[in-house]
Image (tube, rainbow, N blue to C red):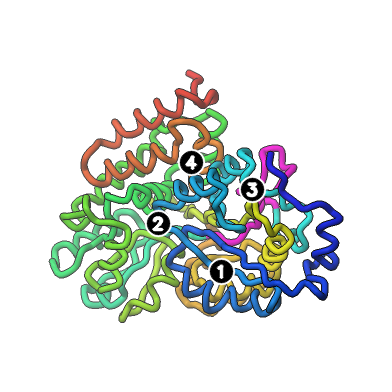
Amino acid sequence: MKTVWCSVAAALLLCLGASGVFAAGNSSEVVLTIESWRTEDSAIWENTLLPAFNAKYAGKIKAIYAPTNADDYNGVLNSKLQAGQAGDIFAVRPFDIGLDQYKKGYLAKIDGLQGLNHFNDVARSAWITDDKSTLYAVPMGSVIHGFIYNKKIFKELGLSEPKTEKEFFAVLDKIKANGKYVPLAIGSKDLWEAESMGYNNIGPNYWHGEEGRKALIEGKRKFTDPEFVAPLKVLAKWTPYLIPSHAALTYADAQNLFTLGKAAIYPAGSWEISVFEPLVSFEMGAFPPPLPEGATKLYICDHVDIGMGMNAATKHPAEAKAFLEWLCTKEFADLYSNALAGFFSLSDYPIVLKDKLANTFLGWRKGAGTTIRVEYQILSRGNPSAMTQLEHFSSEVMGGRMTPEDAVRQIQAGLATWYKPQQKK
């Protein structure tokens, strides 16, 4: 594994104490490059978050934000890492993707950073080794899945927030019958949308959150079991409510369809709030995944979504450490949670959210069972990964190109080729 920290002696020359404050006389300004998949957040990082950090280290450190499109991020970042050209700090996907980067020596150990005590075991779980010995990214934010809707359209058509699946499809039928608006703003071109904003959005209500997710990992349940087929059957029912050209509709196209007021409901989650609010001319509301028939308890996907790690090959480990320690402060938690509405700090600092829609999403946690995306932990380590499988086949089903039954058979068969617990009869 590559060397991840400067020597103690070198660190002492650069740093003063555990706080990361630099010693006098270090006059040359170090520029840190931060990589991320969140291109939508560029203005927030450039105008709010980074100015706060840079002011603390004026003349010493300057951090810049250099994101890559979400669809291309994994491939582009890994290519840069292999070529030794990646940024000093980079956003780390939760669980298997980040763990693989750590195992390949691309991520530095960060145990011992000041402020890590403000993150509990749940927050750390997405960026820690299986034996719980090593943390390789600072837990930064979680997102909550659900549905955002146009209140103006709902009022115009006399619609109410659906609480059950039956009510949900009744709402969609009324929107479609009216003919003025697209009922659901989501496409089947960018594969991850159907998996994240579809399958993992509504699925926890069927597999009962952590109960079903852990059962898959343990090999006690399979993707071919009814509770994992059911969400795909629901996605298949979405098809008539999509725009006719959904097969060519990208993520950005779907966002535009909604923000321009041409679609009534956007299957998504809290991560869209800060993107949509500056763009829309109407009031938005949000509702959680509607309950299936007979269900009484709500389950939501409250996903540990983004962490920040240090490139093991950075030439500026002390400065990168100072940045990561700043991510562990209450100052950052406050700035991040309010500047980037819909991303909820994973720290234990008490934060008062100013955004009404963000508070709506956060309110669903009360009384609900919370879980993460079903395939993110362990099930996506092999080839084919469950994530790749779910992205592809969820899109095929939602696009009307494959049956749910055929999809789960292929997902299960792919997983069983490499994951021993799923090879049990």
Q: Earlier in the sequence, mark 4 or mark 1?
A: 1
Callouts 4 and 3 close, C-beta under 8 Å: no
Q: Earlier in the sequence, mark 1 or mark 2?
A: 1
Q: Is residue 416 visible?
A: yes
Judge from the rendering whether residue 317 lies leftward or rightward of residue 398; answer left or right.
right
Q: Position of residue 25 (x, y in %)?
A: 81, 74
Secondary element at image label 2: loop
Secondary element at image label 1: strand
Judge from the rendering whether residue 404 lies leftward or rightward of residue 211; answer left or right.
left
| Residue at image mark 3 | 107
- Give the crowd class for mark 3: few <14, some 14-19, many >=20 residues within 10 Å: many
| Residue at image mark 4 | 375
Nearer to the camera, 7 or 36: 7
| Residue at image mark 2 | 289
Q: Magenta region: which residues?
A: 121-142
Give the residue type that dot 1 points to: Ile
Callouts 4 and 2 close, C-beta under 8 Å: no
Q: Earlier in the sequence, mark 4 or mark 3?
A: 3
Secondary element at image label 3: loop
Judge from the rendering whether residue 70 lies leftward or rightward of residue 246; answer left or right.
right
Callouts 4 and 1 close, C-beta under 8 Å: no
The residue at 40%/65% (across/down) is 287
The residue at 47%/69% (across/down) is 41
- Give the crowd class for mark 4: few <14, some 14-19, many >=20 residues within 10 Å: many
Can residue 58 be found in the magenta stretch? Answer: no
Give the residue type that dot 3 points to: Leu
Nearer the viewer's eye, disc 4 or disc 2? 4
